[in-house]
Image (cartoon, rainbow, N blue to C red):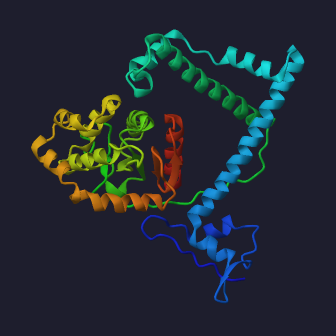
Amino acid sequence: MKQIACLCSFFVVFLGCDYVKKLTKGHNEADVAYTIGGQAVTTADVYSANPIQLFELERRKAQLIREAAAEAYLNKFFADEAAKKGGSPSEARQSYLAEHAKVTDSEVDSMLSHAGSHPQFSSLSPGDKRESARNLMLKSRAQQVLIRLVESAKNDGKLQINYQEPPEPQVKMDVTSLDAVRYNSSLNGQEIGGCADNSCPVTVVELTEFTQPYSAQAYATQKRVIDAHKGKIRWVARQLPSDYQPLSKTLAIAALCAQKQGRYWYFADALFAHQATLKKDVINTYAAEAGLNVSDFTACVGAPKEFDNLLTEQIEGVHQTGVYSTPTYIINGKKISGMVPFESLDKAILEALANKR
């Protein structure tokens, strides 16, 4: 059988031949995928040259199977409920969610106090704003209830998903001068306590973007995680601006300019605190609030070429790992994407610490 030659990006990804072999298990590596000028290229060659894309395809397959299994279980659950109580399965689902997915007036008030000025709500009347906020919360609460039902069924053995998840690729991201580093949750988080640089048993690289609401929520979670593992963790913030937000790259450049003055975390704190009202003409206001030398900061932001090419190269490197969204965390090489609660991040860090022993 032909030896697999793994072709991976030296900049960010270290997968190894064993990883590709695991993903291609069950496929005939000698199968010819295509031929050019009489030279055959096997499926193994294609897989080896595109390990990240292969992983994403396999992960999507596993996700589709999980979703199909979850929906099939929920259909059976509510069909059984309907048989016991009368009515249709659809009515049984609605009744169950009405009982278990409630939202109180105080919860709506709390949401609007934090996000009421967000563009999604700002143009609505007070009554419509409350109704929209309540509907959003009810939808989210209902999803959580259904997820708990499925998880409970898996724990009790009522639902078994036999399809194997693809092995997670290990992603290596070297810390660069463009990255902001902290070892504690204070805004002067560069102060070292317990470990420093590569001596820290856990390094978390967080891909973040200042206009993304989930990145703002992740910023608050980040502080809790660092406090829980102080002395054992190095937290790295890396900018991943969005192509769909005109202000995004400007803010990423501004953050690098703040990093140049050693005050990234102060600046990030100000931007996330005022995320709902971020505009280009108020960036200097938040720079002053963060204690930056505004004159130097303005000159830096006004002449972005210093960071532009480096940032573009770094973004391309991140994309090679299959990461395109924020927030995303790389925890000792393991990738976790999306708005992750404290408990999940804490568990991932504990596992990383255990693997270091």
- Horizontal and vertical percent position of residue 207: 41, 48
Q: Which residue occupies 45% across, 36% down?
A: 214
Q: Quadrant of residue 126?
A: top left
Q: Quadrant of the N terminus?
A: bottom right
Residue 271 appears anywhere in the view: yes
Q: Nearer the viewer, residue 234 or 47?
A: 47
On screen, residue 230 above or below 162: above
On screen, residue 168 above or below 43: above
In the displayed structure image, the side of residue 226 where residue 290 appears, left or right: left
Q: Which residue occupies 54% across, 48% down?
A: 351
Q: Which residue occupies 40% across, 47% down?
A: 242
- Horizontal and vertical percent position of residue 318: 43, 58
Q: Which residue occupies 76% across, 36% down?
A: 71
In the displayed structure image, the side of residue 124 where residue 159 appears, left or right: right
Residue 17 appears anywhere in the view: no
In the image, farthest residue toward the left: 295
- Horizontal and vertical percent position of residue 52: 56, 62
Q: Quadrant of residue 264?
A: top left
- Horizontal and vertical percent position of residue 143: 64, 29
| Number of numbered markers | 0
In the displayed structure image, the side of residue 224 where residue 334 appears, left or right: right
